[in-house]
Image (spheres, rainbow, N blue to C red):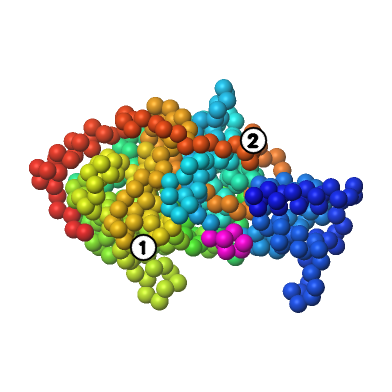
């Protein structure tokens, strides 16, 4: 109701006169101590309350409105109001478009007070891109999401709230691999499939970061050349002369051990890659490779030996670097450890939560235990931790009551083809961030995608779906390893 009222006010402001608003009505007063003009009230008290897509559309009213709605003051005010409102986390997911042609639609739904959503809204649809060949970063970076089209292959940088985007220029081709990807020591867990999830499969890993000093996003790519040398290249949208360039710092030799396709995690100015574990006779050092987005220099994060030997994945959990210890297979335990960060006096790791599947109801324990990939997204109301899975589900873990509840399943909102019931790489579910973040474009000439914004009334209601969906990913292997664990699993200390 409030949003409708504000849209009505904006509409009245637009139609009050045949001529556009005068510049002075939208110009911000030079000091907060002076009386503010009516235009300031309109910008600060009305337009900052609008959804981002509506505010972006109003830029087309006239030059003065465009200047006001693209100013740093408006962007900061809109972001501050959204943060003060303490909005509930929004889940992001994508599925094949409803039309006859090939397309991919992106949706968002809110978890109010940690409860399961009852509806989802369509953000936008991209034509001529297959959802079955789309991989997205699970966590947005300052309002932008990095999307990889495995068929092309090429990368896109999008603001899913406004549709603003850029198609990244072609990058240097990497070595292609066929066959097994990663062999781990006995008893180790990997969130990566044993064989390439698509073809051709390049040996590369790409992440999105933000440089606070320059206010620029950067796309960073580690890859192996056709001669098997490893290197790193960077793309900065909008910076001349454009194109990919080598990173500033030297790439360490250990970086050659990156896990292909798995994206790095961006936290507080740094990208982090988790490297494969050392062998039995090797010292488990240098498992987390870091990259300063601003200085473009590589480094390492110290991890205690006990944690280093067990962690199988990294994530951004509420602004902290999080290490996942997944021992559901042999010990029925799933744990999250967070790093205090570089700003702390003495950086250290601590247990964020630990879930004992044996203490959960059998139905919940079995459903969570059958998932191969379980990645933390963020905290919700009441301190609950949201856990997304490779089968397009989200669970909420409450540490106080030691309970786990499924709060989202993609099939309850959209049709999911049988060959897409499991994400090709990690997750098909992530987080959505409403933020005014324009994608910087170059001098021109970039290819554009066919993007259609969803209407504000285009809402998908939750529906009933069969409970016994058949998954073909690795259910048989899970049962096999469960039986193997009963015979005598390797000892893993938590």
Instruction: Please report the residue visible at 24 percent of the width from the left and 50 percent of the height from the top.
Output: 360
Relative placement, left or right, of 362 versus 384 is left
Relative placement, left or right, of 219 versus 303 is right
Placement of the C terminus among the 4 image quadrants:
bottom left
Question: What range is drawn magenta here?
Answer: 80-86
Closest to the observer, 369 or 448? 369
- How many numbered tags mark residues here? 2
Instruction: Please report the residue visible at 41 percent of the width from the left and 67 percent of the height from the top.
Output: 341
Closest to the observer, 440 or 67? 67
Quadrant housing residue 67: bottom right
Residue 279 in view (yes/no): no
Instruction: Please report the residue visible at 36 percent of the width from the left and 45 percent of the height from the top.
Output: 406
Q: Secondary structure at mark 2?
A: strand
Instruction: Please report the residue visible at 83 percent of the width from the left and 61 percent of the height from the top.
Output: 25
Q: Is residue 469 magenta?
A: no
Characterize the local packing of mark 2: few (<14), some (14-19) or many (20 or more) Cα atoms within 10 angstroms. Answer: some
Closest to the observer, 17 or 192? 17
The residue beneath circle 1 is: 338
Q: Position of residue 228 (x, y in %)?
A: 40, 43
Closest to the observer, 456 or 278? 456
Q: Which label is found at residue 452?
A: 2
Relative placement, left or right, of 402 versus 343 is left
Q: Position of residue 369 (x, y in %)?
A: 26, 43
Q: Is residue 84 magenta?
A: yes
Mark 2 in CB contact with mark 1 (< 8 angstroms): no
């Amino acid at each position: 109701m409030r949003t409708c009222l504000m849209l009505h006010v904006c509409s009245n402001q637009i139609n009050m006169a045949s001529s556009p608003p005068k510049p002075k009505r939208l110009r911000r007063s030079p000091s907060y101590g002076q009386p503010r003009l009516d235009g300031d009230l309109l910008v600060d008290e009305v337009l900052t309350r609008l959804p981002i897509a509506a505010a972006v559309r109003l830029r087309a009213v006239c030059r003065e409105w465009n200047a006001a709605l693209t100013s740093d003051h408006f962007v900061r005010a809109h972001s501050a109001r959204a943060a003060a409102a303490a909005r509930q986390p929004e889940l992001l997911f994508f599925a094949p478009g409803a039309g006859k042609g090939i397309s991919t639609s992106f949706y968002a739904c809110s978890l109010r007070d940690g409860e399961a959503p009852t509806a989802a809204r369509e953000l936008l649809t991209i034509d001529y891109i297959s959802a079955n060949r789309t991989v997205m970063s699970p966590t947005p970076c300052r309002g932008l999401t990095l999307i990889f089209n495995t068929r092309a292959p090429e990368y896109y940088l999008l603001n899913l709230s406004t549709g603003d985007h850029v198609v990244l220029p072609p990058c240097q081709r990497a070595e292609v691999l066929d066959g097994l990807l990663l062999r781990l020591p006995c008893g180790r867990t990997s969130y990566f499939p044993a064989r390439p999830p698509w073809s051709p499969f390049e040996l590369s890993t790409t992440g999105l970061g933000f440089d606070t000093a320059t206010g620029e996003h950067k796309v960073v790519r580690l890859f192996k050349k056709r001669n098997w040398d490893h290197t790193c290249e960077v793309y900065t949208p909008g910076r001349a002369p454009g194109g990919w360039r080598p990173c500033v710092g030297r790439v360490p030799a250990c970086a050659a051990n990156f896990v292909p396709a798995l994206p790095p995690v961006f936290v507080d100015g740094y990208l982090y890659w988790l490297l494969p574990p050392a062998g039995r006779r090797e010292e488990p050092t240098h498992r987390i490779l870091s990259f300063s987005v601003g200085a473009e220099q590589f480094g390492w994060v110290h991890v205690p030996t006990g944690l280093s030997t067990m962690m199988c994945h990294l994530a951004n959990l509420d602004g902290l670097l999080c290490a996942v210890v997944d021992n559901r297979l042999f010990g029925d335990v799933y744990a999250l450890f967070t790093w205090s960060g570089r700003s702390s006096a003495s950086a250290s790791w601590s247990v964020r939560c630990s879930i004992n599947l044996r203490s959960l109801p059998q139905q919940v324990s079995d459903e969570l235990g059958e998932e191969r990939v379980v990645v933390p997204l963020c905290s919700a109301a009441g301190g609950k931790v949201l856990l997304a899975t490779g089968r397009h589900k989200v669970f909420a873990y409450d540490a106080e009551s030691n309970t786990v509840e499924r709060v989202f399943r993609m099939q309850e909102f959209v049709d999911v083809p049988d060959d897409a019931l499991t994400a090709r790489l990690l997750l098909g579910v992530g987080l959505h961030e409403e933020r005014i973040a324009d994608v910087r474009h170059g001098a021109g000439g970039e290819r554009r995608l066919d993007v259609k914004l969803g209407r504000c009334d285009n809402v998908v209601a939750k529906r009933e779906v069969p409970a016994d969906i058949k998954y073909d990913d690795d259910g048989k292997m899970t049962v096999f390893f469960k039986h193997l664990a009963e015979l005598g699993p390797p000892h893993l200390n938590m």
